[in-house]
Image: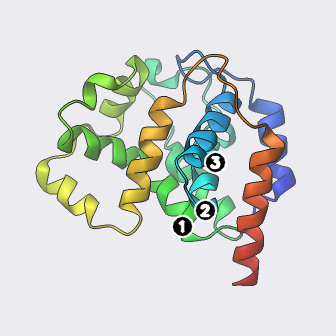
Amino acid sequence: MALSLNDIRSLFEQYGKLAYSGEPVTQLEHALQSGALAEASGADDELVAAAFLHDLGHLLNLQGETPTKRGIDDLHQYFALPFLRPVLSDAVLEPIRLHVDAKRCLCAIDDTYFGQLSVDSVRSLELQGGIFSREEAATFLQKPYAEDALQLRRWDDLAKVQDRATPDLDHFLGVVERVMIQRAAA
């Protein structure tokens, strides 16, 4: 079953107020900040939509607040994909799918990156397989959309600021609607 634009709106309206795992923002605030950072960087609509939707799997597979404290990796990067694949292109879906591995890669290729991760992000890193080896990082970097996933990951890490002003839910649903229309026309 595909998620419609109204389904996505409902998920954010129903569960968006949940805390974003140990961070000073809600799930909705994190999504809005991620999308806003992508827009401010000049990303195209597909990557803005990916940034906005990248953690939608948390809202579909509710595991309570901060599941990593209980040793749970909710596999959120995969959970939403079957519901979004019928309506969104790989330019949106692949950065979402790859954003966890992008963290693992950045830890391997950027000596300063690990030190910038939040406590929960470090905890989830271990549950998600840990830091890539140099070989795993090189393989990751060859994948289609790897660069987009790295960008999305950096926005994800920055999208945890309490009370940051962003465009609203309707604004980003408009972006998602545009990419849905493009996908349907293709």
Whichever of labels 1 and 2 marks the residue nearer the N terminus, that label is: 2
**Left or right of residue 176: residue 101:** left
Q: Which quarter of the rendered picture does the C terminus lie within?
A: bottom right
**Viewer-closest of 93 and 155:** 155
Mark 2, secondary structure of its residue: helix
Point out residue 123 in the picture as x, y percentages from the top left corner: 36, 24
Position above or below: 84 against 73 = below
Q: How many marks?
A: 3
Point out residue 6 in the picture as x, y percentages from the top left corner: 87, 52
Type of amino acid under label 2: Glu
**Viewer-closest of 126 and 107:** 107
Whichever of labels 1 and 3 marks the residue nearer the N terminus, that label is: 3
Task: Identify the residue at horizontal 38%, vertical 69% (top origin).
Answer: 144
- Mark nearer the viewer, 2 or 3: 2
Type of amino acid under label 3: Leu
Q: Residue beneath label 2, please?
A: 46
Q: Residue beneath label 3, please?
A: 53
Task: Identify the residue at horizontal 12%, vertical 50% (top origin).
Answer: 134
**Viewer-closest of 150 and 78:** 150
Position above or below: 110 against 48 = above
Tell me if label 1 and label 2 are in contact, CB under 8 Å: yes
Point out residue 179 in the picture as x, y percentages from the top left corner: 70, 66
Whichever of labels 2 and 3 marks the residue nearer the N terminus, that label is: 2
How many angstroms separate mark 1 from mark 2 (CA)?
Answer: 6 Å
Identify the disc placed on residue 91: 1
**Left or right of residue 94: residue 181:** right
**Left or right of residue 100: residue 15:** right
